[in-house]
Structure formats: C-alpha cells, structure tokens
C-alpha cells in the first residue's frame, strides 16, 4: 500500500487515533497532514479515494476522522462516502472543498463551522473527537458501556456531564489548543483549567490566573503585557506582565467577558501574531503561552449584542467546555458532600460529625445556586458551628432548611419554570433525565423512583428521542 504515514513512524507503543487524509492535490492537504500533532494523532495521507478505501479496510478500527476534499476526481464523493460508511461506521468525515466544510457521520451530514483548517487543525480534530464522545455527532452504538469515573485529578464527580469533561481533558493531553470554559460561578471552571494545565506538556511551567473583571480597565493592559519605566505617571519602575510570567505555561483569563473593548482588540492581535509590546516600550517580545479563558456570562449573547468581539470569541472558542451547574448533575452532590466533610474536617483537625438522615437529605436536595463553592462553604460552616459533632436540620443554613420544607422532589423541575410556562411532556422529559442521572443510568431503578413501569419508561425515552440516554 502506498499510503504514507507522515509522522510517528517510530512511535508505535501508544495507539493513537488515525486521521486519514484523502487528496490528490499534493500540496494542499498533504501540508495539512504535517501540521497534525503527533502526540495526539497519527496522520496518514493517501493520494486518491481507492487508496483511501484500502486504508480503511486495513485499519478501520483506528481511523477516527477522515478528511477529504470532495472535488477530487475518482469515484465521485457520494461513492466514497457510502463505502467509507460501510468500512468505518464510527469514523467522522470532514469534507472540505467548495461546498464545505461539513461533517458526515453515520449517514448524516452536519454543518461545520470553525476556524480555518490550516489555522488550527489540531483544535478542530480535537473538537470533532470531543463532539463524537459527547454524542453530539451520533455514533453507532457499540454495546460497550463507557466506565464512569468518580474523580479526575482534583475534580470530584461521577455524573455523565462531569465524565464528559474528564474525557475531554484526557483528549487534550499533549495539546496546547485554546480552551474556553463557560459556566456559572462556582462550577469549577478554574479547577478544570488547572487540571488541563497539569495534564499538558506545560505542567512544569507556570499556571497564571488573572481575573479580567477585577482589575480596572486602565491598569489591565499593563497587567497583561507589562510596562516600561515612565510609561505612565505611576510607572516608576519597569514591570513584566502576565504574558511574560506565564511564558511556556498557561495563562488563565478568568471572566474574559469583562474585558474592555480596546483590550479585546489588543488581545486578539497578540493571540494571532504571538508577539506583544510592553506598555510604553518599543521592543517586541515573542509569546509562548497557552490560553484558557473562562466566563460566567453567556458569551455568544454578548457577541450578539455587541459587547464582545466575534473574532476574539472564535479565536478563544477553539475547544469549548461547558461546566454545568450543580443542580443539573445532582449525582455529584453526595460525593462532593463526602469529599468536603472529610477534607475540611481533616484540615480542621476535627472528627467527622454525625448527620441526621433529614439533614443529609436536605443537603442532597438543596439547589446550590452558588454551585460547588457554596456546597464547600456550607460544609465548612457546619463543621465550625457544630462543635458537638452532631448535625440536624436545625443546624443547616436557613436557605437549605427552607428548600427542604418545599417538596424537594419537584423543586428542581419547577424552579426552572420559564416565564411562558411549559407543557407536561417537558416536565416529564426532565424528570426522566434527572432521575436517570440520580440512578447513574439504571433504567429499572429510575422507573421505580418515578412510579411507572419499565416498559413505559422505555416508551417515553424513545418518544422523546432519548433512547440512548
Ligand atoms: N468538581 C469539583 N470537585 C471538587 N472541588 C470542586 C469541584 N468544582 C469546584 N470545586 C471547588 O469549588 C471551588 C470553586 O471552584 P472554581 O474552580 O473556583 O469555580 P469557578 O471558577 O467556576 O467560579 C474551588 O474551591 C474548587 O476547588
Ligand atoms: Mg472562578
């Protein structure tokens, strides 16, 4: 076979997903193959569709993504796609060319928008792999259940949504792609960013965090890029900025949505050109910094109403991560309570307190608008306030007690009731999803909890298009 493994020919110990590139134009996609990170993928380039299919026959199981320019001659795009679907049903095909780019998987086409292929091919491949893992691009069921984990590094949780984040962090190892983490305050965005850094090749260099909302706009430029002596009235000495401090490491730009418009332009330019100048200086410095940004605002909304530049948004949103609110992953609450009671009691040199059953239930059912941060604070407060080592409902914070008093089993669904109301089937759907989350996907247990037969649960799941949930 005349396919050419572009990189990685010596590195055979670790089985990496193969990216197959099919193109007869030697210069274009073959150049792309050279940009693919050998730490994450093995890139294989073939000059025509026949050889592409031969490669699929040889190693269909390992080929995860196929990139093809369908204007290329041969058997015509449709023919190739049909054969490819048969030979490698799990692979996603990224189609470039005059109509593209779009994705083809399992017989369906998906629109695909993102940065230019050559600009960030590794980010694009990772985001496709991520979407496949999250089921956003449907994958044929293999019948094999993926194991759920209880923790990843310092991140605790066993819900499906937190496990999707573990898998993403796993995929990102070896990469320096830009990441944008969106989620409410206290959902663990900074913890996720630190974990991504610690599992990256940059782990031995600094992780530097800066909160764009906490620093006045006029000082922010100097915070980021530093200044020369005399650059402005209070600049009595030269000072280096976060970009220099984080050299070789990761810069965490928290609350990026708060960044001033002028600085959005400057930041975009630095990210594109990979160089910057200190305020009041003429020298240009090269940067080698991995950017992870986070926001608790809805950034695409901010783009729509003109508060955030769309070009900067796209430049940052290469690998999107959504940190879900704790109330949407209730399966994590008991684990987190356990973790923080143990840890905090240990740190305080205290024995573990005994919780009454009602107190524990109230803590498990509470809505945690402040997410994990609030949960950790409540635990710390309880340990401080209850020196006799027993905790009952009366010791709980007022908001937890109040919510426990309102029927806890329906509070979650109805607290989110939109202004325009909702229909019963929506409530049922949400109830089923949340219950499955509680039972870690065990359908029999979920049906029992809801009080319906298993048959009815399966029926509803297929009616609501959740058959694989
Ligand atoms: N899944 C988790 N497991 C363990 N601790 C967590 C988790 N999520 C958040 N925390 C802890 O909760 C607090 C708030 O998290 P943080 O990452 O600062 O949230 P955010 O940046 O989204 O506001 C931190 O002390 C963090 O360590
Ligand atoms: Mg934070």
Image (cartoon, grey):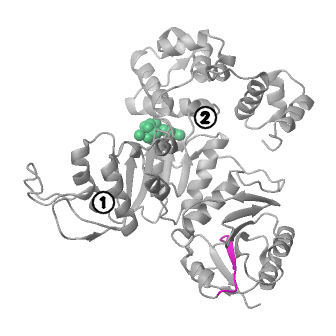
**On the image, numbered disc 1 is attached to which residue?**
243
The residue lying toward the viewer, choosing from 67 and 112, is 112
Task: Give the magenta-colored segment's residue range.
Answer: 16-25
Q: Which mark is residue 332?
A: 2
Question: With 458 as the anchor, is 387 left or right in this view?
Answer: left
Q: Count neighbours of disc 1 (C-alpha within 10 A) and say few if under 14, some if 14 to 19, many if 20 or more.
A: many
Name the residue: 46% across, 23% down: 378
Question: With 85 as the anchor, is 308 left or right in this view?
Answer: left
Mark 1 residue element: helix
In this view, 24 is above or below 288: below
Q: Is residue 211 magenta?
A: no
Name the residue: 76% across, 59% down: 109
Residue 47: % across, % down: 71, 87
Mark 2 residue element: helix
Disc 2 residue: CB within 8 Å of ligand 1: yes
Which residue is situated farthest in the right direction here?
A: 455
Q: Name the quarter where the C terminus is drawn.
A: top right
Q: Nearer the viewer, mark 1 or mark 2?
A: 1
Looking at the image, do the residues carrying marks 1 and 2 touch, with CB atoms under 8 Å apart? Answer: no
């Amino acid at each position: 076979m005349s396919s050419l493994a572009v990189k990685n020919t010596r590195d055979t110990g670790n089985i990496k997903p193969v990216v197959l590139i099919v193109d007869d134009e030697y210069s274009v996609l073959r150049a792309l193959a050279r940009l693919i990170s050998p730490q994450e993928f093995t890139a294989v380039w073939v000059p025509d569709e026949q050889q592409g299919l031969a490669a699929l026959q040889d190693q269909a199981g390992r080929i995860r993504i196929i990139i093809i320019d369908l204007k290329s001659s041969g058997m015509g795009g449709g023919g190739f796609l049909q054969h490819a679907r048969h030979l490698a049903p799990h692979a996603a095909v990224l189609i470039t060319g005059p109509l593209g780019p779009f994705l083809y998987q399992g017989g369906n086409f998906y629109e695909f928008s993102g940065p230019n292929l050559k600009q960030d091919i590794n980010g694009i491949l990772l985001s496709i792999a991520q979407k496949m893992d999250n089921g956003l691009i449907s994958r044929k069921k293999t019948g094999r259940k993926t194991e759920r984990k209880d923790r990843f590094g310092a991140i605790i949780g066993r819900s499906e949504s937190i496990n999707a984040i573990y898998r993403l962090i796993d995929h990102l190892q070896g990469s320096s792609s830009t990441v944008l983490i969106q989620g409410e305050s206290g959902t663990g965005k900074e913890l996720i960013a630190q974990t991504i850094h610690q599992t990256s090749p940059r782990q031995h260099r600094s992780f530097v965090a800066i909160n764009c909302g906490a620093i006045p706009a006029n000082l922010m430029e100097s915070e980021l890029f530093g200044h020369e002596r005399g650059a402005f009235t209070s600049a009595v000495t030269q000072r280096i900025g976060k970009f220099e401090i984080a050299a070789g490491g990761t810069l965490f730009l928290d609350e990026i949505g708060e960044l001033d418009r002028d600085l959005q332009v400057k930041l975009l330019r630095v990210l594109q050109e990979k160089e910057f100048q200190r305020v009041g200086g003429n020298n240009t410095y090269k940067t080698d910094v991995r950017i992870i940004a986070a926001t608790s605002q809805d950034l695409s909304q901010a783009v729509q109403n003109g508060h955030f530049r769309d070009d900067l948004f796209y430049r940052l949103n290469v690998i999107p991560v959504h940190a879900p609110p704790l109330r949407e992953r209730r399966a994590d609450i008991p684990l987190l309570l356990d973790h923080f009671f143990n840890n905090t009691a240990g740190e305080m040199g205290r024995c573990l307190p005994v919780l009454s059953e009602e107190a524990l239930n109230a803590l498990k059912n509470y809505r945690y608008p402040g997410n994990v941060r609030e949960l950790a604070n409540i635990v710390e407060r309880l340990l401080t306030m209850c020196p006799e080592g027993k905790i009952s409902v009366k010791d709980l914070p007022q908001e937890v007690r109040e919510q426990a008093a309102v029927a806890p089993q329906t509070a979650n669904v109805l607290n989110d009731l939109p202004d325009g109301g909702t229909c019963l089937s929506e409530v049922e759907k949400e109830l089923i999803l949340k219950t499955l989350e509680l039972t870690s996907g065990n359908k029999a247990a979920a049906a029992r909890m809801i009080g319906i037969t298993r048959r009815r649960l399966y029926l509803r799941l297929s009616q609501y298009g959740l058959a694989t949930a």
